[in-house]
Amino acid sequence: MAKEQNVSPEDEQGFAAQAGGAADDGGEAGDHSHEELHALLTDARSKADEHWDQCLRLQAEIDNLRKRSERDLVNAHKFALEKIAAELLPVKDSLEMGLAAASENHDVEKLIEGSELTLKMLSSVLDKFNIKEINPVGEKFNPDYHEAMSMQERDDVEPNTVVAVMQKGYMLNDRLIRPAMVMVSKAPAGSSLNEQA
């Protein structure tokens, strides 16, 4: 037979008070954790929204930069000759005025004088844009800058010398844009120079 445990009324009140206190502590702890989680979630959402806005702004800036770069590149190709074109317009004006004056006056000297002035203006424009003339008369033939069109027997110059320029060449900023078309010397047949060559 089970023994009955004797509990006094004072003990019952003490147990009830302890149980109630424990229940209260557990409820406060649960409420506190929920508030903290809610605050953390709110803060995380706020930061996520902020970062998303920054991402959108950066994407928009990148798109604008790309579009601006593409537009600048197109304009650079389209208007690369703008400066030289503006410098050449006075040359064209001078040619037109010279031709008009020559047709009215039929003065050859005036036409020559006007042509010389126009050529001087054109040379000035070429110099301004660092376009250098290649006129190698008397120089050694250089296949890097000269294009031999024919050869001529000459005993007054060394073989392989440019003796005539049929069309001048030009360089832009030390880059060849057109070779000079030249006539090159060779030793006369039977000469000692030819035998040596």
Image (spheres, rainbow, N blue to C red):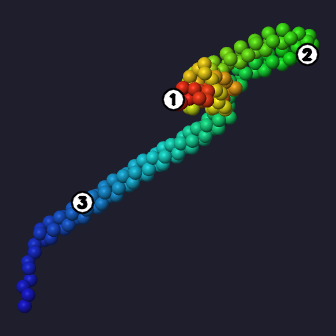
In the drawing, does residue 16 fall left or right of residue 179? left
- Cα separation, mark 3 vs mark 2, equals 115 Å
Q: Residue at x 63, y 18 (%)?
A: 127
Instruction: Name the amino acid, label 3.
Output: Asp
Residue 103 is labelled as 2
Residue placed under numbered mark 1 in the picture: 196
Q: Is residue 163 above or below residue 197?
A: above
Whether tag 2 and tag 1 are in contact, CB under 8 A, the answer is no
Crowding near the residue tagged with mark 3, few <14, some 14–19, many ≥20 C-alpha atoms within 10 Å = few
Q: Residue at x 56, y 29 (%)?
A: 194
Q: Residue at x 68, y 34 (%)?
A: 78
Q: Is residue 155 above or below residue 65?
A: above
Q: Is residue 90 above or below residue 6?
A: above
Instruction: Name the amino acid, label 1.
Output: Gln
Q: Is residue 35 above or below residue 157?
A: below
Q: Position of residue 64 (x, y in %)?
A: 58, 40
- Cα separation, mark 1 vs mark 3, equals 117 Å
Placement of the N terminus among the 4 image quadrants: bottom left
Residue placed under numbered mark 3 in the picture: 25
- Cα separation, mark 2 vs mark 1, equals 57 Å
Q: Position of residue 100 (x, y in %)?
A: 88, 16
Q: Position of residue 25 (x, y in %)?
A: 24, 60
The front one of 127 and 115 is 115
In front: label 1 or label 3: 1
Going from N to C along the chain, the mark reached first, 3 or 2, is: 3
